[in-house]
Image (tube, helix red, strand yellow):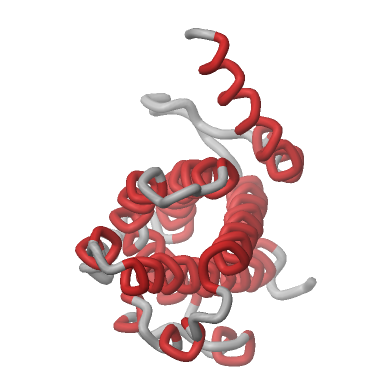
Amino acid sequence: MDSKGWSLKGSLLLLLLPDLLLCKSVASLPICPRGAANCQVSLRDLFERAVILSHYIHNLSSEMFNEFDKRYAQGRGFITKAINSCHTSSLSTPEDKEQAQQIHHEDLLNLILSVLRSWNDPLYHLVTEVRGLQEAPDALLSRAIEIEEQNRRLLEGMEKIVGQVHPGVRENEVYSVWSGLPSLQVADEDTRLFAFYNLLHCLRRDSHKIDNYLKLLKCRIVYDSNC
């Protein structure tokens, strides 16, 4: 790699440093290596790791949305058009803690899996399309890459949790299909920027919901609601 490549890589690492430090404790938690059939991780450790990851993803999502809003969306009135237009709106999700507490933990676990799976495709394409944004700051790309990776890790962790809470039960593979790629690639700048804005707005919203649901489930399942 030439000096320019190393310089870019170093810049991205510096931009991510605060967030990486925030998530540093995740690496210290036990995790099964791929293919380790006899590896056992306690349910408590799996939940601890999932909660840290979900909070990290939500922080990154909020920072990415705020950066995009500041640079590209000022004065365009995007927020009024972005309400209730998320691709995951087809999934019935509780809007607050009180509603979430009324849902059986098995259903809430499956709902989290559905939301995470619904973001696999859009996050993959978000990374690709951010590269084509005019004068896109390095922070947008670095955060998009990090969010995609950590969403995959959180999904893997949630599958392990479901396997321990309900061993032998087939996982619910329901998810909401995203069809927004053409809007991210359209020639009209205002339409394209709104598509980015809306996607990041929805990502921030859904990551916040997952973060809250996981904290509730950790309290309910690991600590028998005594927290």
Residue 7 to residue 20: above or below:
above
Q: Is residue 168 visible?
A: yes
- Disc tally is 0
Q: Is residue 178 visible?
A: no
Query: Is 13 positioned to the left or the right of 65 in the image?
Result: right
Q: Quick one: quadrant of the C terminus?
A: bottom right
Query: Is 52 positioned to the left or the right of 81 in the image?
Result: right
Taking the spot 59% from the left edge, 45% from the top edge, the residue there is 139
Q: Quadrant of residue 199?
A: bottom left
Residue 93: percent from the left, percent from the top? Answer: 44, 83
Of 19 and 6, the residue lying toward us = 6
Residue 226: percent from the left, percent from the top? Answer: 77, 73
Taking the spot 66% from the left edge, 39% from the top edge, the residue there is 16
Of 198 and 208, the residue lying toward us = 198
Taking the spot 62% from the left edge, 34% from the top edge, the residue there is 30
Of 190 and 126, the residue lying toward us = 190
Taking the spot 46% from the left edge, 50% from the top edge, the residue there is 151
Residue 22: percent from the left, percent from the top? Answer: 75, 45
Residue 98 to residue 106: above or below:
below
